Image: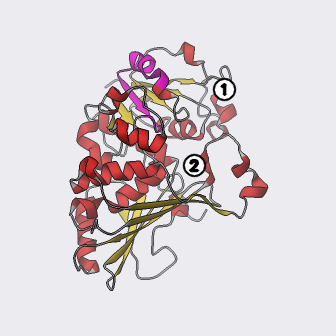
Amino acid sequence: MSQVRVAIVGGSGYTAGELLRLLLFHPQVEIAQVASSSHAGQYVHSLHPNLRKLCGLRLCHYDDLSTCDVIFLCMPHGTAMQAIERYRNLAPVVIDLSADFRLRSPDLYLRWYGKEHPQPELLAQAVYGLPELHRQELREAALISGTGCMATAAILGLAPLYRAGLVDQGQPLVVDAKVGSSAAGATPGPGSHHPDRSGAVRSFQPTGHRHSAELIQELGALAGVGGSWRQTLAFSATAVELVRGVLVTAQVFLNTDLDEKVIWRLYREAYREEPFIRLVKERSGVYRYPEPKILAGSNYCDIGFELDTDQRRLVVMAALDNLVKGAAGNAVQALNCRFGWDETLGLTFPGLHPI
């Protein structure tokens, strides 16, 4: 089989750099072009120095893109939706890593993004690019959306409970997400200035985070309530002194008395065949719960839990690398699904320890 030719648009950002790192070693992929509106003409390795001697491409301008098999869009939120038809005319498969096509409902988009979506008909066509939940739909998809890094961790951590109908939806779902600085992107800002960021544990969005919408959409579908979600969702996001990493701690109340063995069996059955989900629950040691530090560079999501039997409260923990399983790696996994390849192609790096 001939290689699939791909182009990456928005080539200067961290997500594009991760896509390049992964796809350069993907046996079924040829990277044909990398485009940037502001860095055209520069070598890719001048922006992504870890790729020296691995990638000899120069960045082209968006206007110089040619047809290919797949286009990855790594542009800022709100950009892809304005020119999506142009990219769809260049490639039969478009994978957009921004938030522009993550939500199926125009009403949900309006509520959480505060404006009308300019392409509402495409929202229903796009497939939410989380293979663990949408593997079948991805196989026929022409437009695939990326997933929010914190949303990905929370959804994967909670999905088995909602699918099994074990959540008391009359009680709040409380989600606390801690995330590293790379989630803010490559463009410097006041929050990423080293004297302000170093040593910080900064609550940057204690309420109203847009990733809440993805939880409502995906967990609501698993619970069978669809757009009729009524459960109170309390989502808070905190910036911590990591470069890479997400740790979600979710507190959910169960609707029946269960012991940990039953819950363990539920998770084990749900994720037994998933190549990138690892269940973590050790009796002792530093790494007895999920820890994003050891996931840096990998496409794994580690999930663990602790049961408070007195309150029927389950504390679910999920960790991942926000640039890989939370962005570029998840997109490559979705690409593998789309073309019927082994989902692990290009994604077998295990992370580093110690680091």
What amino acid is labelled 1 in the image? Tyr
How crowded pointer 2 is (Cα within 10 Å; few <14, some 14-19, many 20+) is rated as many
Q: Is residue 332 visible?
A: no
Q: Position of residue 134 (x, y in %)?
A: 28, 44
What segment is highlighted magenta in the picture?
A: 82-100
Q: Is residue 170 visible?
A: yes
Q: Is residue 200 left or right of residue 65?
A: right
Gap between marks 1 and 2 measured at Cα: 24 Å
Q: Which mark is residue 255?
A: none
- Position of the C terminus, as image quadrant, is bottom right
* Residue located 65% across and 33% down the image: 45
Quadrant assignment, res 163:
bottom left
Closer to the camera in the image, 9 or 80: 80
Quadrant assignment, res 281:
bottom left
Judging from the image, what secondary structure is the residue with disc 1 in?
Answer: loop
Q: Is residue 81 above or below residue 227?
A: above
How crowded pointer 1 is (Cα within 10 Å; few <14, some 14-19, many 20+) is rated as some
* Residue located 39% across and 48% down the image: 214
